[in-house]
Image: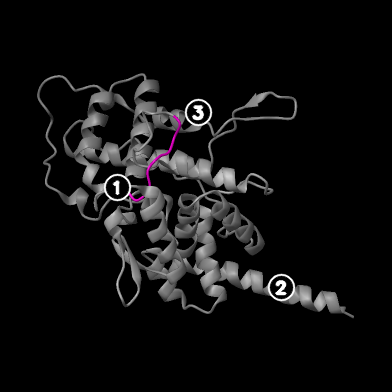
């Protein structure tokens, strides 16, 4: 989830009381999303849209009368993904701190937009609501042996599956960056193949090197499985059994289904983003400098990349201590 493009809030929209009746929350939310379309990635637009639709359905008052209590009540009512306990009962856990903060951010940006247009007066309803404290976590990468098994399963299944998994692992792509790739973004040259990531987080494009084995795999996939396509067509499309979806751009749910299918025999719950984490930690294990990894991952600050350094150092410490313990500590 990315922050809005810097500078958007400085656009001149004089704060004046609009004439006539104030439009409904739903109408204003739709207008807000339309104006912010250029500034938000597809995943961010979806998050904002869901948050604003949920708030509009539950808020009992029009926008000018929204108070912090209404916003806090909405945030407290958020639920996480349901699951079934051992007795088969369906449980709806509270939303995670990250989800809480994402919904709060969506409302805050919407209220700022509405205030600039005179639909809302300061202070904003979200001003008195603090973000939830996020637990300190190191990035969750995947074990090397698990990665080898997943890559083998993908290779045995199809060129498409193998290309998807290797692009996430060997190029460190975010899920949405992978889904946004077009055929022309894969560029072959005598100096070596490159991948142009045009829709990176924060609207920051970057180039990522593609190794020879992955380059050959992608060429085989395009010639044997992708079928006839134009340069601007999506690199990966859906192969759903449902004819309404087949041939359309692959969605996150489709990518997640592929990852779950390939990791089903493994313990735990793996996600597409963990391949990106593994890309970073494996490069650090090979001695690649953190500043180079920062560029490859598209991080805006060095602090974001240093989390992987902590993870790599922890793994190295565990491996070294295991060697000593195997030999006998005393």
Q: Secondary structure at mark 3?
A: loop
Work out whether residue 281 or residue 226 is closer to the camera in this orientation and state it. 226
> Can you tell which mark lies on residue 143?
none
Q: Is residue 139 magenta?
A: no
> Can you tell which mark lies on residue 319?
2
Please tell me whether mark 2 or mark 3 is closer to you in this view. 2
Are discs 1 and 2 less than 8 Å apart at CB? Answer: no
Q: Which residue is mark 1?
A: 228
The correct choice, above or below, for 190 with respect to 114 in the image is below
At x 55%, y 77%, the residue is 286
Q: Specify the segment rendered in magenta.
A: 234-241
Residue 246 at x, y percent in the picture: 38, 35
Image quadrant where residue 92 sits = top right
Q: How many marks overall?
A: 3
Image quadrant where residue 297 sits = bottom left
Q: Which residue is mark 3?
A: 77
Which tag, 2 or 3, sits closer to the chain's start? 3
Q: CA distance from mark 3 to mark 1?
A: 48 Å
Which tag, 1 or 2, sits closer to the chain's start? 1
Q: Is residue 239 magenta?
A: yes
Work out whether residue 165 or residue 239 is closer to the camera in this orientation and state it. 239
Q: Quadrant of the C terminus?
A: bottom right
Residue 281 at x, y percent in the picture: 55, 68
Q: Is the residue marked by circle 2 packed among few (<14), some (14-19), or many (20+) residues within 10 Å?
A: few
Q: Secondary structure at mark 2?
A: helix
Q: CA distance from mark 2 to mark 3?
A: 44 Å
Q: CA distance from mark 1 to mark 2?
A: 48 Å
283 sits to left or right of 102: right
Which tag, 3 or 1, sits closer to the chain's start? 3
Helix, strand or loop for the magenta stretch, by majority: loop
């Amino acid at each position: 989830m990315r922050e809005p493009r810097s500078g958007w809030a400085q656009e001149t929209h004089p704060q004046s009381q609009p004439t006539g009746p104030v439009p409904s929350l739903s109408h204003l939310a739709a207008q807000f999303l339309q104006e912010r379309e250029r500034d938000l990635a597809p995943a961010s637009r979806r998050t904002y849209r869901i948050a604003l639709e949920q708030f509009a359905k539950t808020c009992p008052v029009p926008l000018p009368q929204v108070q912090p209590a209404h916003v806090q009540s909405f945030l407290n009512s958020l639920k996480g993904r349901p699951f079934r306990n051992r007795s088969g009962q369906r449980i709806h856990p509270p939303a995670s701190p990250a989800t809480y903060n994402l919904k709060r951010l969506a409302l805050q940006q919407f209220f700022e937009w509405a205030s600039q247009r005179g639909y809302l007066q300061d202070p904003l309803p979200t001003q008195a609501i603090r973000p939830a404290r996020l637990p300190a976590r190191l990035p969750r990468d995947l074990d090397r042996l698990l990665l080898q098994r997943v890559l083998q399963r993908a290779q045995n299944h199809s060129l498409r599956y193998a290309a998807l998994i290797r692009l996430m692992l060997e190029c460190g792509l975010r899920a949405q960056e992978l889904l946004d790739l077009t055929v022309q973004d894969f560029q072959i040259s005598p100096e070596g193949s490159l991948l142009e990531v045009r829709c990176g987080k924060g609207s920051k494009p970057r180039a990522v090197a593609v190794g020879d084995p992955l380059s050959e795999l992608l060429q085989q996939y395009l010639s044997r499985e992708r079928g006839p396509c134009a340069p601007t067509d999506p690199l990966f499309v859906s192969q759903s059994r449902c004819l309404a979806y087949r041939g359309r751009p692959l969605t996150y749910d489709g990518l997640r289904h592929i990852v779950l299918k390939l990791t089903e025999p493994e313990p735990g719950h793996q996600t597409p983003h963990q391949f990106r984490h593994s890309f970073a930690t494996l490069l650090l294990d090979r001695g690649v400098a953190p500043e180079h990894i920062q560029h490859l991952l598209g991080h805006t600050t060095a602090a974001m990349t240093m989390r992987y350094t902590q993870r790599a150092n922890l793994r190295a410490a565990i491996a070294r201590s295991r060697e000593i313990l195997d030999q006998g500590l005393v």
